[in-house]
Image (cartoon, rainbow, N blue to C red):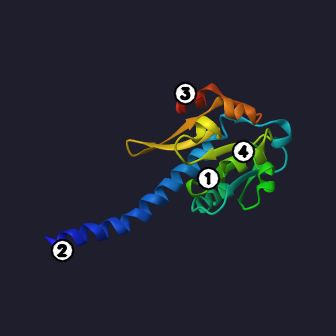
């Protein structure tokens, strides 16, 4: 009986990183696809399209894979790890990983109306701060969306995106 428990434990230990990597891939793809349904202010549609990741996250490598192959309209995608809140307003999208969610007020204040889509990864943040928040429902990746929070940032939202996500206010 003990051997069976060890085998289950080993299977879990080896499968968890693969599951996490798959989640990061889905989140990165979602993030890229959001760009098809959002409109940034004119000043944010010039030069590069910057996706900032606030802190450290494995999603950076997945976003870099997309950035090598895709563009947002005519804009080249640049992925940056952000450590200084002053850099956030230069981004088109800022991803706040769950381990940095305690800094969401700092992120929101730094982006204040600057045409930045804040994407978070902790339950409840779309109701208070972020425009888009990742959630898992029945083991499947999904997202919440706050039209109000996106509009505060000067972002126009296509109704098709609202129908794809879970609208919160």
Image quarter of the N terminus? bottom left
Contact between labelled residues 2 and 4, with CB atoms less than 8 Å apart: no
Residue 108: which numbered mark, if any? 4
The CA span between labels 1 and 4 is 12 Å
Q: Residues within 10 Å of mark 3 (few under 14, many from 20)?
A: few
Q: Earlier in the sequence, mark 4 or mark 2?
A: 2
Residue 15: percent from left, percent from top? 37, 64
State whether residue 71 appears in this view.
no
Q: Which residue is mark 3?
A: 163
The CA span between labels 4 and 2 is 50 Å
State whether residue 13 appears in this view.
yes
Q: Earlier in the sequence, mark 3 or mark 1?
A: 1
Q: Which residue is mark 2?
A: 3
Q: Nearer the viewer, mark 3 or mark 1?
A: 1
User: Left or right: where does residue 166 sit relative to residue 155?
Assistant: left
Q: Earlier in the sequence, mark 1 or mark 4?
A: 1
Residue 21: which numbered mark, if any? none
The CA span between labels 3 and 1 is 29 Å
Q: Which residue is mark 1?
A: 102
Residue at 54% over, 40% down: 124
């Amino acid at each position: 009986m003990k051997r069976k428990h060890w085998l289950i434990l080993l299977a879990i230990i080896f499968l968890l990183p693969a599951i996490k990597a798959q989640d990061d891939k889905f989140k990165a793809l979602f993030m890229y696809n959001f760009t098809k349904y959002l409109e940034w202010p004119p000043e944010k549609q010039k030069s590069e399209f910057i996706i900032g990741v606030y802190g450290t996250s494995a999603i950076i490598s997945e976003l870099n894979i997309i950035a090598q192959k895709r563009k947002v309209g005519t804009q080249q995608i640049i992925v940056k790890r952000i450590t200084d809140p002053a850099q956030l307003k230069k981004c088109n999208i800022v991803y706040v990983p769950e381990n940095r969610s305690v800094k969401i007020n700092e992120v929101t204040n730094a982006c204040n109306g600057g045409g930045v889509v804040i994407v978070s990864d902790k339950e409840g943040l779309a109701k208070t701060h972020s425009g888009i928040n990742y959630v898992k429902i029945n083991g499947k990746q999904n997202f919440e969306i706050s039209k109000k929070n996106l509009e505060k940032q000067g972002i126009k939202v296509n109704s098709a995106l609202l129908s794809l996500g879970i609208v919160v206010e």
